[in-house]
Image: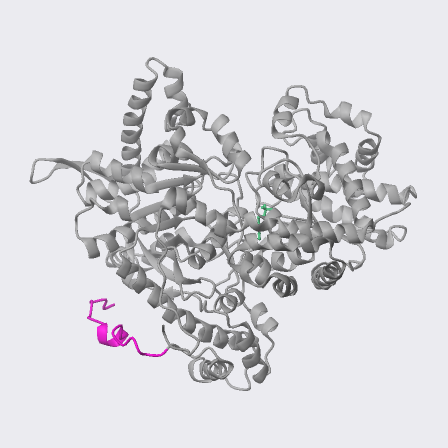
């Protein structure tokens, strides 16, 4: 391939500033859609596949993004702006079309254009597969961050991996989860631009070698490596109506050309093709483990691949523009590490600066410590990544050497500060000693960074008091909190157009970029006419959700029932079990005729279980078995419905959050770092039943205790209770829980599947139950009775619903990004050229 550099100036026409931007009116859009469909895609009236109509539309929209993208790059370059790079192994983007249309302000014109073409916008939207390059909250957070950064016009670029297969598709077979590969790239992805001109070389294996350079300085180099190429694919990230389009750069692994040739010349053609596959494995699949480490070779390979490709890319841009002088590098660059996953960036930046750019250790370390910032996402010990030293040695020998050196210097600092405290040195070491020595990635993140943050106030406090206590004592100034958020553009304006319209009709549309303005709804909460409109919108959204449920689960949700929803990854700490126990309790009340003043409930539970997480998978089976019994019992009828919604993803959540009455945020206190599903629901006017955990605490503070259904032990109480936790005694003393456990034990939900739920029963009665399901049952049941009582008063409920939405302003990622920028990144916003009313650049 000829990748010789040409002067492309004439081709790209950057000097022709009066080239008018593309038309944003229905007629221009329609013309372009027709053009792409016939001239580019070569389709005609005989093509039956809707996908190609979608593709023509996507290309039409992409053209409009492309010119803004180019202008944004130019503006950043001209401003010589300080930049931030958000490194994340996950970006749970969902679909792009609807969001791009919204952010470009094209909604109405697209509707018109499609109308003329006899196409329905919903069908176009549905033709696009979700970009499911993430597990759950952590990956979706990264996606919301990018949206907010583009809207705030911050020069932030995302770096991630272009997995060939994203998050698996979840099917349910006989109540069990069955995973199916998600080949989201089977059709051409029109939202990415391959940029081979920025490919990078990534080293693996081999060994390091020390030598003296011409100036007699001792240096190291990493040799005899098996290299892999990283090919970047750029995805446009449009800001909201502001002319800015930022970049998400995703890397794909490809075999190097020589690699193939070597094998080929040795006469092993088949072997050379196999070697190619080996290299390309690195970005083949997303690891589907949410909040648990994995320890697999390939996963460490992915993490290093992302860190190395991204850092080399940033450094290449630096040396191209600034040359070999790194003295201002830290002033103009900053890296935010999304959890420990990309923490190889710390030793890798050291390596690049030392071995490739020949800085001294002290110069390099100063740059690393001034550019890296680390975000922690969990307190669960099983999620804290550790890599065996042996694996590191084998895969990344030069990196391990650097980690040892960082550790030696760091432990010297600890010893100086706490002389003789060997126990402390052992605790804080980057290397955990033991039969299998391991590299502690979180500690590497802390030592290498100037900022360490948690994702909600409680979480950040618990980090400082617990997990990272020693480090907090050493460097209190590094630690800070950044409470998560979600973008209201996707999660309210796009996902809930009816509510968005109603809100804008009363307070204007300023909330789309300043969510705090929702506060202006507060005085309307008691307004009878507004309440009725609010209720109408909720009912319309419940109908859409009921249609979705009927389609996916074959169960009819009665519209007058309370829509009670828990959607999130299936995990013991999130306590879907507590929810099911309560459902069983409601079922028993119906069976016992205890239904005076009954509030009908339609309960939806959804989420994926990690394929290796047996207990989570069994919980899914239990939900399905309980659902089958309840939904087929004529005595239950419309009083109670339960479904397990298969394949929960971003597109499903867009429908779900708008149609939910009650949001279940019921994790064991101290275990959910923040939660973001909770915020999507609140924004859309759902009420929350929840524990004092993660961001629930701050949500309750914002909306007031009267408008939040609180239950359960606090984080402190959970820890206190552990020491004398006796679930058997709790069950014996609680009539309701006792009956629920009895019914479970009687195999009522598994009559022909003897014993399958025994592990669940054992977990609940185990005094070592980490999640203390039994401890919170009674308090949960009482709070749920309070919910039903509140729902009976529809006017009161609607008032609270409005107040929840009105109080959700804090939970916009616009606020979150503003705080990251104020405290950590310190970037200047840079505006790109805007298009004026006359359709020309201003
Ligand atoms: C928001 C979101 C999550 C995170 O939900 P939590 O309740 O905070 O765990 C996970 N998955 C998807 C698809 C989401 O949209």
Nearer-the-camera pick, 352 or 299:
352
The answer to which image quadrant residue 673 occupies is top right
Question: What span is colored magenta in the figure?
Answer: 1-20
Residue 520 locus on image (x, y percent):
61, 55
Q: Residue furthest top?
A: 420
Residue 620 locus on image (x, y percent):
68, 46
Look at the image and tell me in which quarter the C terminus lies: bottom left
Would you say residue 223 is visible in this rendering? no
The relative height of residue 312 versus residue 719 in the rendered view (above or below) is below
Residue at (41% x, 62% y) in the render: 235
Q: Residue furthest front?
A: 523
The answer to which image quadrant residue 495 occupies is bottom right
Residue at (39% x, 45% y) in the render: 336
Residue at (31% x, 33% y) in the render: 403
Nearer-the-camera pick, 528 or 292:
528
| Residue 8 within the segment the image draws in magenta | yes
The answer to which image quadrant residue 245 occupies is bottom left
Dominant secondary-structure state across the stretch colored magenta:
loop
Would you say residue 515 is visible in this rendering? yes
Residue 684 locus on image (x, y percent):
64, 55
């Amino acid at each position: 391939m000829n990748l010789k550099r040409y002067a492309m100036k004439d081709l790209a026409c950057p000097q022709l500033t009066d080239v008018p931007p593309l038309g944003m009116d229905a007629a221009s859009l329609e013309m372009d859609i027709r053009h792409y469909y016939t001239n580019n895609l070569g389709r005609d009236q005989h093509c039956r596949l809707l996908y190609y109509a979608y593709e023509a539309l996507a290309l039409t929209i992409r053209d409009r993004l492309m010119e803004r993208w180019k202008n944004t790059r130019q503006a950043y370059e001209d401003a010589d702006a300080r930049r931030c790079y958000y490194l994340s192994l996950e970006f749970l983007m969902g679909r792009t079309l609807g969001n791009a249309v919204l952010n470009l302000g094209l909604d109405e014109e697209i509707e018109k254009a499609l109308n003329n073409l006899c196409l329905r916008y919903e069908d176009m939207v549905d033709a696009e597969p979700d970009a499911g390059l993430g597990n759950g909250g952590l990956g979706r957070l990264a996606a919301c961050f990018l949206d907010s950064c583009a809207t705030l016009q911050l020069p932030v670029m995302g770096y991630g991996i272009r997995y060939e297969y994203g998050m698996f598709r979840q099917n349910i077979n006989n109540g069990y989860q069955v995973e199916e590969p998600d080949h989201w790239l089977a059709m051409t992805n029109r939202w990415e631009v391959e940029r081979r001109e920025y490919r990078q070389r990534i080293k693996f294996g081999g060994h390091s070698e020390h030598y003296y350079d011409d100036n007699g300085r001792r240096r190291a180099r990493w040799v005899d490596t098996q290299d892999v190429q990283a090919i970047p694919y750029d995805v446009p990230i449009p800001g909201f109506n502001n002319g800015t389009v930022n970049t998400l750069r995703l890397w794909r692994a490809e075999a190097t050309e020589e690699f193939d040739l070597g094998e080929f010349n040795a006469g092993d053609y088949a072997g050379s093709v196999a070697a190619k596959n080996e290299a390309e494995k690195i970005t083949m699949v997303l690891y589907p483990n949410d909040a648990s480490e994995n320890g697999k070779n390939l996963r460490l390979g992915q993490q290093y691949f992302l860190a190395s490709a991204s850092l080399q890319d940033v450094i290449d841009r630096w040396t191209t523009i600034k040359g070999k002088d790194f003295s201002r590098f830290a002033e103009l660059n900053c890296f935010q590490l999304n959890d420990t996953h990309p923490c190889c960036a710390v030793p890798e930046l050291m390596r690049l600066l030392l071995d490739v750019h020949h800085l001294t250790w002290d110069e390099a370390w100063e740059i690393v410590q001034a550019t890296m910032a680390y975000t922690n996402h969990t307190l669960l010990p099983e999620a804290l990544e550790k890599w065996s030293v042996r694996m590191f040695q084998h895969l990344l020998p030069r990196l391990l050497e650097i980690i040892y050196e960082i550790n030696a210097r760091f432990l010297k600092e600890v010893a100086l500060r706490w002389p003789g405290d060997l126990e402390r040195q052992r605790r804080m070491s980057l290397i955990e000693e033991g039969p299998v020595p391991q590299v502690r990635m979180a500690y590497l993140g802390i030592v290498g960074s100037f900022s360490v943050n948690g994702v909600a106030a409680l979480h950040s406090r618990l980090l400082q008091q617990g997990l990272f206590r020693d480090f907090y004592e050493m460097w209190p100034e590094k630690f800070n909190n950044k409470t998560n958020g979600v973008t209201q553009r996707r999660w309210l304006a796009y996902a809930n157009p009816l509510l968005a319209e109603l809100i804008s009709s009363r307070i204007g549309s300023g909330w789309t970029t300043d969510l705090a303005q929702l506060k202006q709804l507060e005085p309307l909460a008691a307004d009878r006419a507004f309440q009725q409109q609010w209720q109408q919108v909720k009912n319309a959204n419940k109908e859409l959700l009921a249609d979705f449920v009927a389609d996916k689960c074959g169960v009819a949700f009665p519209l007058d029932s309370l829509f009670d929803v828990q959607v999130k990854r299936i995990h013991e700490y999130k306590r879907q079990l507590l929810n099911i126990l309560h459902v069983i309790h409601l079922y028993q009340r119906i069976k016992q005729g205890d239904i005076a003043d009954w509030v009908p409930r339609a309960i939806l539970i959804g989420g994926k279980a990690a394929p290796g997480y047996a207990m989570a998978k069994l919980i899914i089976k239990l939900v399905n078995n309980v659902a089958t019994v309840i939904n087929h019992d004529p005595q239950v009828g419309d009083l109670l419905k339960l479904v397990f919604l298969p394949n929960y993803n971003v597109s499903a959540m867009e429908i779900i959050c708008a149609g939910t009455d009650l949001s279940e945020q019921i994790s064991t206190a101290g275990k959910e770092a923040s939660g973001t599903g909770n915020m999507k629901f609140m924004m859309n006017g759902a009420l929350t039943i929840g524990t004092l955990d993660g961001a629930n605490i701050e949500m309750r503070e914002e909306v007031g205790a009267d408008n939040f259904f609180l239950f359960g032990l606090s984080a402190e109480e959970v820890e206190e209770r552990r020491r004398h936790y006796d679930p058997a005694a709790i069950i014996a003393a609680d009539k309701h829980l006792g009956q629920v456990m009895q019914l479970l034990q009687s195999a009522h939900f598994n009559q022909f599947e003897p014993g399958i739920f025994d592990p669940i029963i054992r977990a609940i009665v185990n005094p070592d139950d980490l999640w203390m399901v039994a401890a919170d049952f009674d308090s949960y049941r009482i709070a749920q009775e309070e919910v039903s009582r509140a729902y009976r008063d529809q006017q009161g409920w609607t008032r609270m619903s409005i107040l929840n939405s009105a109080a959700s302003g804090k939970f916009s990622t616009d606020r979150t990004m503003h705080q990251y920028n104020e405290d950590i990144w310190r970037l200047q916003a840079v505006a790109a050229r805007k298009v004026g009313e006359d359709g020309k650049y201003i």
